[in-house]
Image: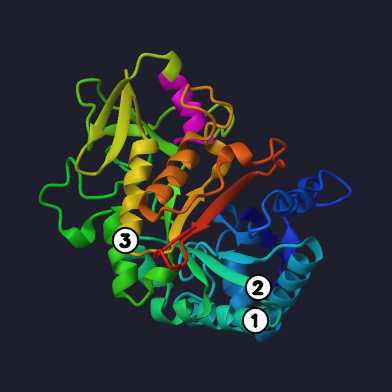
Amino acid sequence: MYAFAGINTQGIVVSLDPHLDFPENKDNFRKFNDLKKKNPKLKTLLAVGGWNEGSSKYSIMAASPVLRKNFVQSALKTILDYGFDGLDIDWEYPNRRDTVHGKADVDHFTKLLKEIKEEFLKYSLILTAAVSAHKKTASLSYDVQSISKHLDYINLMTYDMYGAWDPLTGHNAPLHKGEGDNGVDRDALFTVDVAVEYWLKSGCPPEKLVLGVPFYGRTFTLKSTNHNGVRAPVTGAGINGPFTVTSGFIGYNEFCSKLHTESWTRRRDNLAKVPYAFRDLHWVSYDDPQSIIDKVEYAYNLNLAGIMIWSIETDDFNDICGRGKFPLLTAINDAMYRYTGVSTTTPSSKPTNYPETTSASTTLALTTTTTGKCL
């Protein structure tokens, strides 16, 4: 998935960075789709939306038959012109944030997906959506059973469960209930398994649900070095990555470099099945190869469609941490092979001249075969 394109006030899909995307400059739309020359089985999707796009433009577009038509036709033209295989809708979020039409967004979103899918079927194009994970928030935004009818895959954003917006430390993407969660009602937990259970119980078929895993960590500043565990008091965001430069956020490649060169205390929450680390007043929740393997196993055991990554450029692609190139992506591929017996395309076979993008994500979809599942 190439992230992101956006829309204008007429609902027309537009580039958010023409200098990167278009042929007269960096030409990354073409470079991205040229990856299929290396792997003919690769499917490429254009993602539209994202956090920075907000909700209001999409709320307005989805409410208007004219603007929905503009969106569908312009998305289709961009996809066909540049050789994408489909579209990922990342409206964050219907009936939330700066929404214009509120609760009506829920039905409008379903209608939008239906109209896109009807047009895409003519061209055998793929339609997916990135969706909010937790029941408390997802229940405000989606008619799960209805949108599932029109989507090929539903990419569950099972990360950002806790972050610098919270008064206490917490895991970015805990698989299960963990340290500090004693006495918390299950429905109130912010965990991967609770999120998955909600989507499945709400009517999303497991074969369409894709589990999101983060290739980044969330950072905090502790109030005191005497309290450095899970649910320790914090004063706000922690360290930034030197390249991602985002408050409270650090790429895995950026943080593993710090672990490699600085003195950090590493811990693993064996209940939540994720690691964390601290140094002085700095506290970081992140995923490592083992925690990601645990999530692949969890997805496999529930017959989910596969794994979605946010985002591939924050893997350790230069082997600065001594685990080899692409340790997180390799962990996913190795786990897929372990559970399915089907070989996968490994990072070493990927081209070295990745196109420059502001961000990107990869979906590894599991489909039914004679062995049960494969990439």
Residue 315 position, x and y percent, is 52, 36
Spatial CA distance of label 2 from label 3 is 28 Å
Q: Which range of residues does the magenta coloring cover?
A: 246-259
Q: Which image quarter holds the N terminus?
A: bottom right
**Disc on res. 109:** none
Answer yes or no: do the residues labelled 2 and 1 have beta carbons within 8 Å? yes
Answer yes or no: do the residues labelled 3 and 1 have beta carbons within 8 Å? no
Q: Could you tell me the amino acid type at mark 1? A: Leu
For label 1, the residue is 121
For label 2, the residue is 125
- In the image, taking residue 101 as reference, residue 293 lies left or right, namely left
Spatial CA distance of label 2 from label 1 is 6 Å
As drawn, which residue projects farthest toward the right?
A: 24
Q: Could you tell me the amino acid type at mark 3? A: Ala
For label 3, the residue is 195
Question: Is residue 371 rendered magenta in the image?
Answer: no
